[in-house]
Amino acid sequence: ICILALFVVIFRKRSPKGNKGVEEKQGSATKGKAEYERKQDISLEKIGYETEKQIAEIVKQEIEEGLDGYVLQNLYIPKENGGTSEIDAVLICTKGLYVFESKNIAGYIFGDEKQRDWTVTLLSGNKTTEKHKLYNPIWQNNTHIRHLKRYLDSSIPVNSVIVFSDRGELKNIPRHTESATIIQTRDLKEYLDSIRHSSPDVLTSDEAYDIC
C-alpha cells in the first residue's frame, strides 16, 4: 500500500491562496462589502488552485519525459496534536522527495530565510504603495516537511521547493538557501530537468512506489 496516498484529499482545499490582504475599499454598506469579499474569496481560491494545478502539470510532464516518479497533490498530514498540515504537492521519485509550497502573490516580494515575516509591496491605483506581511514560506514548508518525516524512513532525503507564481517579482531573494529552493513557475521546468539529468538516484523505483 502506498503510504502517502492515504493522505491525498480528493476534495479541494478550503483555504484559498493568493493576496489575502489585498482588498478593494468599499463603502459603508455592510451587505455590499460582504458580497464583494465573497466574490474576492472565490476569485483568489480559483487563482490559487490554478497555480497549484499548474505546478502539478509541469511535474507530471517531467515524469512523462523520463523522471522515474509520482506526484501527489493536496495532502493533509496528521500532526501530533490532532490537527493537519496541508501540503500542496509532493514529487516522489528515485532522486528523493520534493515538497512544493506554492505562493500565488502579485507585487514585489522581499525576504530571507531568517526573517519570520516577508514583505509584499504593491502599487495602488493612486501611485502609492501598500505593504503586506507574508509568513516566511521557507519556515512554513519546513513545518510541513517535519510532520511528513514522521511517516518516512529517516534515510530518505526530503527537499523543500517554494514556487511563486509569475504574477510577482522576487527582490533580492536567493534561489537556494540552506533548507530550500525558491523559484517561480516559469523556472520550474528547468529546475526539474536539472534534477532528472544531474541528481543521483537515492531510491530504487520500487522504493519510490512504496512511499507514494
Image (spheres, rainbow, N blue to C red):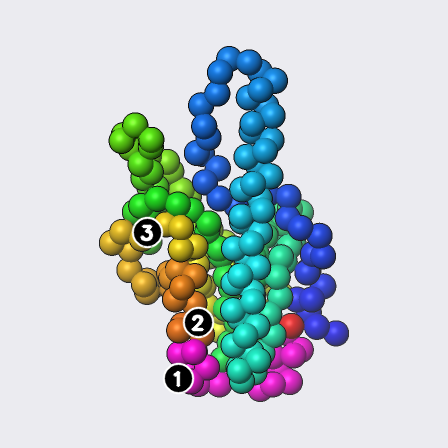
Left or right of 196: which side holds 129?
A: left
Q: CA distance from mark 2 to mark 1?
A: 14 Å
Residue at the limit of the structure toward the right, as seen here:
1
SS majority, magenta: helix
Amino acid bearing label 3? Glu
Q: Residue at x 31, y 39 (%)?
A: 121
Label 3: how many residues lie within 10 Å, few (<14), some (14-19) or many (20+)?
some
Q: What quarter of the picture does the N terminus occupy?
A: bottom right
User: Would you say residue 130 is visible in this rendering?
Assistant: no
Residues shaded magenta: 193-211
Residue situated in front as seen by the camera: 144 or 35: 35
User: Would you say residue 158 is visible in this rendering?
Assistant: yes
**Secondary structure category for the residue under label 2:** helix
Per the image, the residue denoted by label 1 is: 198
Q: Residue at x 27, y 51 (%)?
A: 171
Q: Residue at x 45, y 40 (%)?
A: 19
Left or right of 205: which side holds 145?
A: left
Per the image, the residue denoted by label 2 is: 189
Position of residue 1 relative to residue 138, above or below, is below
**Secondary structure category for the residue under label 3:** strand
Q: CA distance from mark 1 to mark 3?
A: 28 Å
Q: CA distance from mark 2 to mark 3?
A: 18 Å
Q: Mark 1 or mark 3: which comes first in sequence?
A: 3
Residue 169: assigned label: 3
Q: Residue at x 57, y 59 (%)?
A: 53
Task: Examine the structure image and report whether residue 196 is included in the region drawn in magenta.
Answer: yes
Label 1: how many residues lie within 10 Å, few (<14), some (14-19) or many (20+)?
few
**Coordinates of residue 95 in the picture (x, y in percent):** 49, 80
